[in-house]
Image (tube, grey):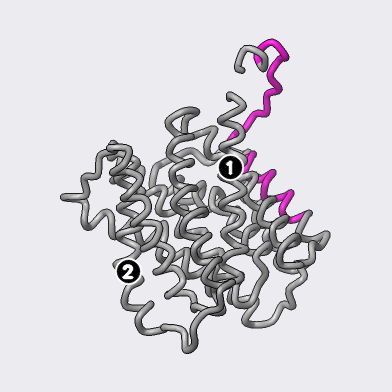
């Protein structure tokens, strides 16, 4: 991996880790559905402009039903569930819980893609959910009924993200990534339009909330997806997916730095277990490049 690609990977993790901070600030002001409707609409318009400017193919004809499914599973549903959850739990806790996506993906792949469930994967899944239990039970959030429901909502959102990956692999293979990126936003906007209209905020959102919405749409969605698909093209999907290891670390850091969220020992231990479990289910082997290879890559 070249230094520029490594920098892009870290930037992507920082942007996606920051999305939880932006949601935490904006969700109380806009409400979950209006906030996420604004996110996907603004992001969709920006992506369309970028793709047109780069002359990337945009061919959504004949994909209506599949775009609606991927828009629901990979955006509308998990986005809204996380936003609703962050009305009651911290941004850092939400970011750690969302790191369970590969664990759910492993379970779904066994049933839907006939992938083999190895011993490492079993240990990884068990370890990962043990990490979730530690994070949920030993965090700075009081374990009230709303908090418990919010934790469950984030986990359902993670399950939805995982299902979207399986669905895309089975039904959307060969479709240009630019088409999928834009189509996902359009499909999500269609799902969220009516809920957003029904639950409009009762008072005008503050400038801080509006700024968070714009940052969420421009930085954590439009720019992040451009980086994501660029990395897939340059270094491949496997290396790109290692961003999963970094997102909760940035989510915790941004929450502590900008929202004064408290980092507990349980959160760090649970986060470590979840990240370790992802390595087990993904079969990751860490390799340290030689100095000669590092120099040659520059």
In the image, is residue 93 part of the stretch drawn in magenta?
A: no
- Which residue corresponds to the image point at 74% horizontal and 78% vertical from the top-left? 142
**Mark 1 secondary-structure assignment:** helix
Judge from the rendering whether residue 291 lies leftward or rightward of residue 11; answer left or right.
right
Q: Between residues 169 and 36, which one lies in front from this camera angle?
A: 36
**Mark 2 secondary-structure assignment:** helix
Predominant secondary structure in magenta? helix
Judge from the rendering whether residue 264 lies leftward or rightward of residue 204; answer left or right.
right
- Quarter of the figure with residue 295: top right
Q: Which mark is residue 49?
A: none
Q: Cβ–Cβ below 8 Å for labels 2 and 1?
A: no
| Residue 96 pos. (x, y %) | 65, 57
Q: Which residue is mark 2?
A: 191
Which residue extends farthest bottom? 202
Judge from the rendering whether residue 72 lies leftward or rightward of residue 295; answer left or right.
left
Tag 1 or tag 2, which sits nearer the N-term?
2
Which residue extends farthest right? 265
- Which residue corresponds to the image point at 38% horizontal and 77% vertical from the top-left? 196
Reply above or below: 247 against 293. below
10 Å neighbourhood of mark 1: few (<14), some, or many (≥20)?
A: some
| Residue 209 pos. (x, y %) | 56, 72
Q: Which residue is mark 1?
A: 243
**How many marks can you see?**
2
Instruction: Specify the segment rendered in magenta.
Output: 269-293
Which quarter of the image is occupied by the N terminus? top right
- Which residue corresponds to the image point at 47% horizontal and 53% vertical from the top-left? 162
| Residue 116 pos. (x, y %) | 49, 38
Q: Between residues 148 and 85, which one lies in front from this camera angle?
A: 85
| Residue 290 pos. (x, y %) | 71, 15
């Amino acid at each position: 991996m070249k230094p520029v690609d490594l920098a892009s990977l870290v930037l992507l993790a920082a942007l996606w880790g920051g999305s939880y901070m932006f949601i935490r600030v904006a969700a109380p002001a806009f409400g979950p559905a209006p906030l996420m409707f604004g996110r996907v609409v603004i992001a969709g318009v920006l992506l369309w402009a970028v793709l047109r400017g780069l002359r990337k193919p945009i061919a959504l004809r004949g994909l209506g039903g599949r775009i609606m499914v991927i828009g629901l599973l990979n955006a509308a549903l998990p986005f809204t569930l996380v936003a609703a959850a962050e009305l009651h739990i911290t941004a850092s806790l939400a970011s750690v819980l969302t790191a369970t996506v590969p664990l759910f993906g492993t379970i779904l792949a066994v049933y839907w893609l006939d992938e083999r469930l190895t011993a490492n994967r079993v240990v990884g899944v068990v370890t990962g959910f043990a990490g979730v239990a530690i994070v949920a039970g030993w965090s700075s959030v009081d374990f009230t009924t709303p908090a418990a429901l919010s934790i469950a909502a984030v986990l359902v959102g993670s399950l939805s993200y995982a299902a979207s990956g399986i669905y895309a692999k089975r039904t959307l293979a060969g479709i240009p990534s630019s088409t999928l990126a834009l189509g996902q936003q359009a499909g999500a906007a269609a799902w969220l339009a009516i809920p957003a209209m029904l639950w409009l905020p009762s008072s005008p959102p503050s400038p801080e909330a509006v700024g968070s919405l714009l940052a969420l749409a421009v930085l954590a969605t439009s720019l992040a997806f451009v980086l994501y698909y660029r990395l897939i093209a340059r270094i491949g999907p496997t290396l790109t997916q290692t961003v999963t290891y970094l997102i909760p670390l940035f989510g915790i850091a941004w929450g502590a730095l900008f929202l004064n969220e408290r980092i507990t020992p349980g959160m760090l231990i649970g986060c470590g277990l979840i990240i370790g479990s992802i390595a087990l289910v993904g079969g990751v082997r860490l390799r340290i490049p030689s100095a000669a290879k590092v120099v040659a890559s520059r």
